[in-house]
Every structure is written in C-alpha cells, then in structure tokens.
Image: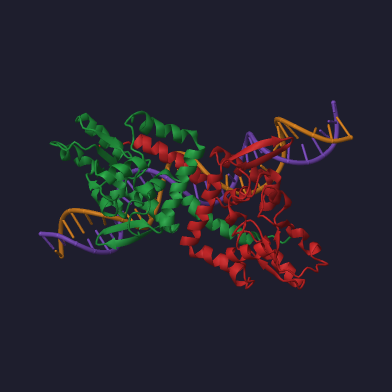
Chain colours: A red, B green, C orange, D purple
Amino acid sequence: MDDHRPWKDAVYGQFARIGKALGHARRLEILDLLAQGPKNVETLAHELAASSAAVSRHLQILLEAHLVTFQKHGTYVVYQLARHSVADLVHQIQVVSEDVLADVRELHHLYLTQQDALDPVNPEELQALMATGTVYLIDVRPPAEFAAGHLPGAVSVPLPDVADHFAAWQDDRPIVAYCRGRYCLYARDAVQILREQGLVARRSEITVRGWGDARPSA
Amino acid sequence: MDDHRPWKDAVYGQFARIGKALGHARRLEILDLLAQGPKNVETLAHELAASSAAVSRHLQILLEAHLVTFQKHGTYVVYQLARHSVADLVHQIQVVSEDVLADVRELHHLYLTQQDALDPVNPEELQALMATGTVYLIDVRPPAEFAAGHLPGAVSVPLPDVADHFAAWQDDRPIVAYCRGRYCLYARDAVQILREQGLVARRSEITVRGWGDARPSA
DNA sequence: GGAATACTCTACTATTATGTTGAATAGTAG
DNA sequence: CTACTATTCAACATAATAGTAGAGTATTCC
C-alpha cells in the first residue's frame, strides 16, 4: 500500500491555509462584515474598534488565503469576499459553533433571547405582514450595506438615525427592524430605542444573512 | 452608538476556537477520516503516517473545540465527529479551497484527472448502471468504514484485497470502484491495479462524501 | 500478579503568529 | 510642489503552536 503522503500533505496543507486564516476572532468578524458588501480598511477598523494597521495586517492574511480580493479606488483600498462560498463557510462555522459549543448558545441567549422578550418576528410572520402591507420594515445597517443589497420592501434607517426618523411618527403599523445576521446587534438596539419612545417595534429573525442571496452577485 | 465589543469579542472568540482547530493539515485530515466513521487513535495514526503521540495531541485540540467526542472501549479510545455539521464544515473548506486556490485545482487534476484518463463514472451513469445491474460496484475503503455505512448495492473489497479478489474473475460486468471522497486515492489505485490485470474498471465520481447521509445517524 | 497494549502527558526546542509603534508609500487636492 | 489622507511595511516583544522522545496511566490477557 504505497502511501500518497506528499500529495495528501500538499492538498490538506492547502485546506489548512484556509483554516488558519479563519483562526482569529477579528478575521472572522471582518469576513462577516464583508459578507454585507465591500468595505475599505478604515470602515472595517472603525467597526472593529481596532487600529487600521492591525486590520490591514489581517486583510493581508485573508488575501494570502485568497478569501478576499481588493480594488483600489483612489487612496481607498476596497476589500470584498473573493467568492460567495466564503460567506457560506463563515456561516457554517457559526452553525457548528452553536451546535457544539454551549458557550455560544449562552452568549446568544444572554443578549438576544433573554433581554429581547422582544418577541421576534419569525420568517413566516414577516412574509405575511409584508404581503398585507401591515408593517414598516426598516434596515438599520449603515447605508452602504443597504445599498449593496437589502430585503425587498425595506426602508433604510441606519441605527444612528432611528430616534430622529421616528420622532414625530404617526403611522400605526408596527415597526420591524432587521440587520446583518444572527450576531449583529443593530436591530436589537433599534427596537430598544423605539420602545423607549413608546412605539410598537419588533426585531426580525430574518436578516440579510438569512435571506441569503437577495443581494447582487458580489 | 455604544459598542458591544465585549460581547462580540466573546462570540467571535468562540467561533475562532473552531477556526483555530481547523488550521492544521493533519487535523483536517483527521476530521475527514472521522467523517467515514469512528476510529481509534492507532488507526488514525496509521492512516496519517504520524506518531500516535502527535495524533493524540491533535485529537485533544479537536476535543477542546468540541468538534469530536470519544468513547472508551477497553484500552481503545474511539473518536468520532461530535455532529454531522462538522463534516459539512470540513467539506465547505474544501469547496472554498477549490473555488479560490488555483493550487488545489492543479493538485487535484495532477492526480485524478490527468492520470485518470480513467474516464470516471458520473452520478447519473452510475445510477443507470446500478438500476440495470450491469455493473459490479466495489467499496475499496477499509472494512470498518464500509461497516459504518456504504452505497447501496456495493460490495466491500478493501484496497489491499483487490488483486486477490479479482484474480480468477470471469464476470464480464465492468467494475466500478468508489472510496471516501474527492481527496481519497483508494479508488484510483484500485482501478490502476485492475487495469494492470486486464480488467474493465472505472472510478466512480460518487463517493461516500458525495452520497452524503446514506450512513446511519452518527 | 506481571506483561503487553493503547493512549496520554511532560518537557523541551524550533517555529510561527500577534499586536504595537512609528516610519514609508501612494494617491489627491490645492 | 506641498500638505494631507489612506494604507502598508518593518521591527520588535510576547505569546502560542508543533513535534519528539520518553515517562506515566489504565486496561486487558495470561
């Protein structure tokens, strides 16, 4: 039984390149953000509360693994996922984590389920509400991400604008907010703000991530 | 915009635990092998051509990431994947790799496509052949993996037994061999052996991996 | 009980990854 | 050309990881 070690080492070594690139919290977060649309280094650094040097470093690593590509626009370097399958991969890691690590489920519950007795709107319910027009669906992500793709029928109301947007609100339809995905807290925060203003607001369980490929071919 | 850094760091930190565990060629190979069925340390060490101390070490790391579980059977410690989603994750890494790394495609072609002018049998064709019974389908993986689940209608002929099994072969049906998946070379080797014996043999593109969940709930 | 087997653990060394700082590069606007 | 901005690079200190050899543990078999 002649062994094919050199070949196997080469093949699995290549797989490991991808694995290694996924072995850091910040890089996974970067990929999750890029799944929402292309972004430049500064934007990412701001979202991550990290130095741009550090983010740039992580982006180089992702680039070496060919998980992202970039384009230069003037002095800006805009990064994006190399393929849609990369977003699926990151998603699968999250699925496995929740499947397998009790800690993740707890963290998730802590922030989203418990505090958010906020009875979330499930996919079917949202669809029904949208069909009858008895809901005001808001996308609370940054405008650039809305522009890169959003749920049909949604209105862009970035989180920082939420309070103002609804200051003199008279419409009596319930407000439903959605954001990036399961690990994005924008929708939760939006609902909290709106409830403090005495409005009827709920968080959608459908997110851009769940909706999946509504966005244009990246 | 109060940042939820501590929560995000915790959540993505957990994801990164999984990512880190995937950041090594041998560990990915271990997971791929375990996707075929439970195995003990020695078996894995033999398949990987590595010391059992090293394999044990890697298994500890996979264990800490909760990607595998184990059971003690006498002096044997039998490891298995913690969930089926783990196999999907490893598969997704391979998909992304082929998608994104030209090197992997080349390595794959080098061994499987080129040398294997072996016109492989594609899924539809195999199904048709099986339906009419005009094929002898062999599973060339180790017997334990066959026992853990195999394609319907297949006969177990482990690679080391292939030459003997067909020594006095008279059946004129073509032989089709399959193995673990896209990166397993057993079927390729089997076909090579059989052709040297002057028999009609081909490699199946369907493998246990492609067939997916024919195997019992692991 | 004693030997054999299967696995894990402990040091130890070599290698690789991370984050920070400040400097270097490259493009843009005046 | 100069000042400015966005990004990357270089160099360092620190930490984590990989592999190996050999000791240690636990279970089975005789």
Horizontal relation, residue B199 to residue D8: left or right: left
Where on the picture, by quarter, is residue B148? bottom left
The one nearer the camera, A170 or A82, is: A170
Residue A80: percent from left, percent from top: 62, 42
Q: Is residue B61 visible?
A: no
Seen at 38% across and 31% down, the residue is B113
Compared to residue A174, the image places residue C5 above or below, namely above
What is the number of callouts on the image?
0
Which quarter of the image is occupied by the N terminus of chain B?
bottom right
Which quarter of the image is occupied by the C terminus of chain B?
bottom left
Residue C23: percent from left, percent from top: 72, 35
The one nearer the camera, C4 or B128, is: B128
Seen at 47% across and 39% down, the residue is B98
The one nearer the camera, A93 or D2, is: A93
Seen at 76% across and 73% down, the residue is A198
Compared to residue A48, the image places residue A76 above or below, namely above
Q: Is residue B53 visible?
A: yes
Horizontal relation, residue B29 to residue A71: left or right: left
Horizontal relation, residue B176 to residue A96: left or right: left
